[in-house]
């Protein structure tokens, strides 16, 4: 770890094109995989050239400042100039300001990436190890299968029903308009288990989601907190969910019912407005569709809005996550009261669940998902998975519990 307030090492970074396209997951560490990918494209990392850790209310602002120093001190040779080439850090940040979980930026020793038919390798070393550049990682066979059944954790299904009912009471009393409540499932990883099985399962089952594995946080998220790319900024806000139908007709009806439900439209509007309000000071020409669209995932339907704009203040993607987190998709409205209610009703630390997870490049561009449909795997092998639902005045506790079950499905199935 580096003192994030002081000196940073001078990194030497060299990106080279690779002539063969390789699957990313077999290249990474079986117990500590480092991956951020979607639709077969993305980046995977091996080793740690630099690890920066952050905690507390300023964790993202501190990370943004530290990253500018790291990038300024680095010597980068990057003939490709694509998103994800050159110097990159993977990152995962805790949801709450007072979380015990550490937020991290990890610069791997080697990054392998693929995008639009191009593959590359980036080797990163500190000045002192320049003489021995990191080796090209080799694919290793994925380990034996295992089955872990996750069981209720600190907040049981019955406890969740009580928490939702309490929240609905507080919303109807006028204390808060929306609050997102989560529950947890727990389990334990067998010794020697290969976590790449879980990552591969998620990538295969949920190709349109971001598959991520960063510092023990593993999951498959459909939600883009923010992407910064060459002066443009974009996001995909999700809020409002329903089960997939049993056949094509029922499925279509479910989507139409979701799109026309005032309860879900309200829930969505809070999330969208919170993102727009936080984004506007940093951008202009911010556009979003007039109405949310229905996004089909293998496990459920979501109401979704895509947002795009032009950055006006030179914000990096880390500056932007600091400005945007937490949106009302994972916290509520108004934010402060919703966060207090979450602390009161959820008997656990969310860790990095519902926080930003993604990557940042030397120029500050990057892509950050909201860490949903995920589990934290500790160094000791303890697994904690989380799933939540947005509660509004019209919420029904049993339906919100059912929604969390659907949202747990990707992770529950990937571990079993
Ligand atoms: C909180 C979660 O999901 C969020 C809440 C949603 C909802 O309440 O409808 C939908 C998508 C996410 O923004 C989760 O998956 O744990």
Image: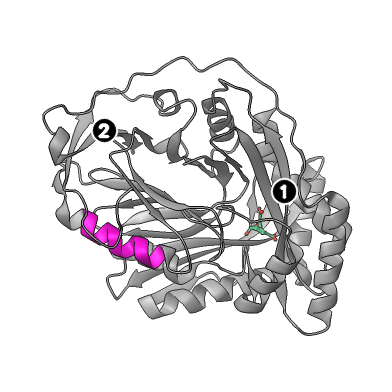
Q: Does any atom of ligand 1 lie closer than 8 Å to the CB of label 2? A: no
> What are the residue bounds of the magenta stretch?
60-70
Question: Of helix, strand and loop, which mostly describes the magenta segment?
Answer: helix
Looking at the image, residue 188 lies above or below residue 253: above
Q: Please give left or right for residue 328 compared with residue 186 in the image.
A: left
- Which residue is depicted at the point 46% across and 32% down? 32
Q: Is residue 374 above or below residue 304?
A: above
Q: Are marks 1 and 2 in contact (CB under 8 Å)?
A: no
Q: Which residue is mark 1?
A: 184
Residue found farthest to the bottom: 174
Circle 2 Cα neighbour tier, 10 Å, few/some/many (<14 / 14–19 / ≥20): many
For residue 272, the mark is none
- Dot 1 lies on which element? strand
In this rendering, would 351 be left or right of 71?
right
Q: Nearer the viewer, mark 1 or mark 2?
A: 1
Residue tagged 2? 120
In the image, residue 106 lies at what x, y percent? 36, 45
Name the N-terminal-most of marks 1 and 2. Answer: 2
Residue 243 seen from this side: no
Which residue is found at the position 47% from the left and 38% from the top? 39
């Amino acid at each position: 770890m580096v003192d994030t307030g002081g000196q940073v090492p001078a990194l030497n970074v060299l990106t080279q094109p690779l002539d063969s396209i390789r699957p990313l997951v077999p290249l990474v560490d079986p117990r500590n995989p480092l991956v951020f990918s979607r639709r077969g494209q993305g980046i995977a990392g091996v080793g740690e050239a630099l690890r920066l850790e952050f905690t507390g209310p300023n964790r993202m602002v501190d990370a943004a400042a530290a990253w500018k120093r790291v990038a300024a001190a680095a010597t980068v040779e990057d003939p490709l100039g694509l998103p994800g080439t050159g110097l990159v850090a993977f990152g995962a940040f805790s949801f709450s300001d007072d979380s015990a979980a550490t937020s991290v930026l990890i610069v791997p020793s080697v990054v392998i990436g693929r995008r639009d038919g191009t593959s590359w390798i980036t080797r990163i070393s500190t000045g002192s190890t320049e003489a021995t550049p990191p080796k090209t990682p080799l694919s290793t066979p994925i380990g034996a299968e295992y089955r872990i059944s996750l069981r209720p954790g600190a907040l049981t299904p019955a406890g969740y029903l009580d928490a939702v009912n309490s929240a609905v009471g507080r919303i109807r009393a006028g204390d808060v308009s929306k609050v997102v409540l989560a529950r947890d499932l727990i389990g334990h990883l067998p010794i020697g288990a290969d976590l790449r099985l879980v990552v591969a399962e998620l990538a295969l089952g949920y190709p349109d989601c971001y598959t991520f594995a960063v510092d023990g946080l593993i999951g498959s998220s459909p939600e883009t907190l923010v992407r910064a790319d060459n002066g443009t900024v974009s996001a995909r806000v999700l809020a409002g969910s329903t089960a997939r139908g049993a056949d094509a007709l029922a499925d279509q009806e479910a989507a139409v019912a979701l799109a026309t439900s005032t309860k879900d439209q309200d829930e969505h509007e809070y999330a969208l407005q919170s993102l727009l309000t936080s984004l506007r000071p940093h951008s202009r020409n911010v556009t979003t569709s007039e109405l949310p669209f229905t996004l089909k995932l293998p496990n459920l339907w979501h109401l979704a809005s895509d947002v795009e704009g032009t950055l006006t203040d030179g914000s990096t993607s880390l500056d932007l996550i600091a400005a945007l987190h937490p949106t009302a998709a994972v916290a509520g409205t108004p934010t402060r009261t919703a966060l207090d209610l979450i602390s009161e009703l959820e008997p656990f630390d969310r860790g990095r669940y519902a926080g930003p997870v993604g990557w940042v490049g030397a120029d500050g561009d990057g892509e950050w998902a909201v860490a949903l449909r995920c589990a934290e795997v500790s160094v000791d092998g303890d697994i904690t998975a989380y799933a939540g639902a947005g509660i509004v005045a019209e919420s029904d506790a049993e339906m919100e519990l059912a929604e969390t079950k659907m949202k747990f499905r990707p992770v529950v199935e990937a571990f079993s």
